[in-house]
Amino acid sequence: GNLFKIEASNVILHMNGFTISNTGGVAIAIGQVSNVSIDNGVVTGGIAGIYTSQDAAIDLQIRNVDFQACAAGLKLTGVTGLVVDNCI
C-alpha cells in the first residue's frame, strides 16, 4: 500500500532530513491536486518513491530528495508544471 497519500491541494511535505522507509508499494502517492511540494529527505525501498496516476498533479515540486533502493524513484504520469531539483 501507500505510506503517504496526498489528496489535497496546497500541501508541503517537508521531510526535515528524515527517511521514509518503504518495504513494498508506493512511499508517496499524489492524487488529482495542485501546488504540492516535497523536499529535504530520503525515500527507500518499494515500487516507487513518488507516484502520480494519469492527469494527476499540477505544479508539483520535488527538491532535495534522495531515492535509495526504489524500483523507480519517480513514477510520474500526466504532471504539468513539474520541477525536480537536486534529487538522486
Image (cartoon, rainbow, N blue to C red):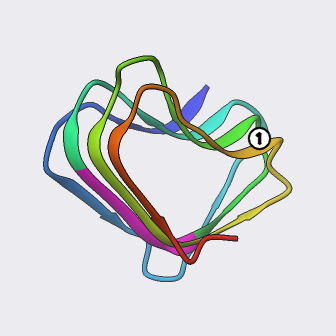
Q: Can you tell which quarter of the image residue 41 is in? A: bottom right
Q: Can you tell which quarter of the image residue 38 is in? A: bottom left
State the residue at coordinates (43%, 81%). 16
For mark 1, does the 10 Å Cα neighbourhood hold few (<14), some (14 to 19), or many (20 or more) residues?
many
Marker count (numbered): 1
Q: Which residue is mark 1?
A: 46
61 versus 49 height, above or below: below
15 versus 61 height, above or below: below
Q: Give yes or no for residue 40 being in the magenta stretch.
A: yes
State the residue at coordinates (35%, 25%). 56
Out of 87 and 31, give the one closest to the viewer. Answer: 87
User: Is 4 left or right of 3, judged from the image as shown?
Assistant: left
Q: Position of residue 33 (x, y in %)?
A: 22, 32
* Secondary structure character of the magenta stretch overall: strand
Q: Which residues are magenta?
A: 36-41
27 versus 84 height, above or below: above
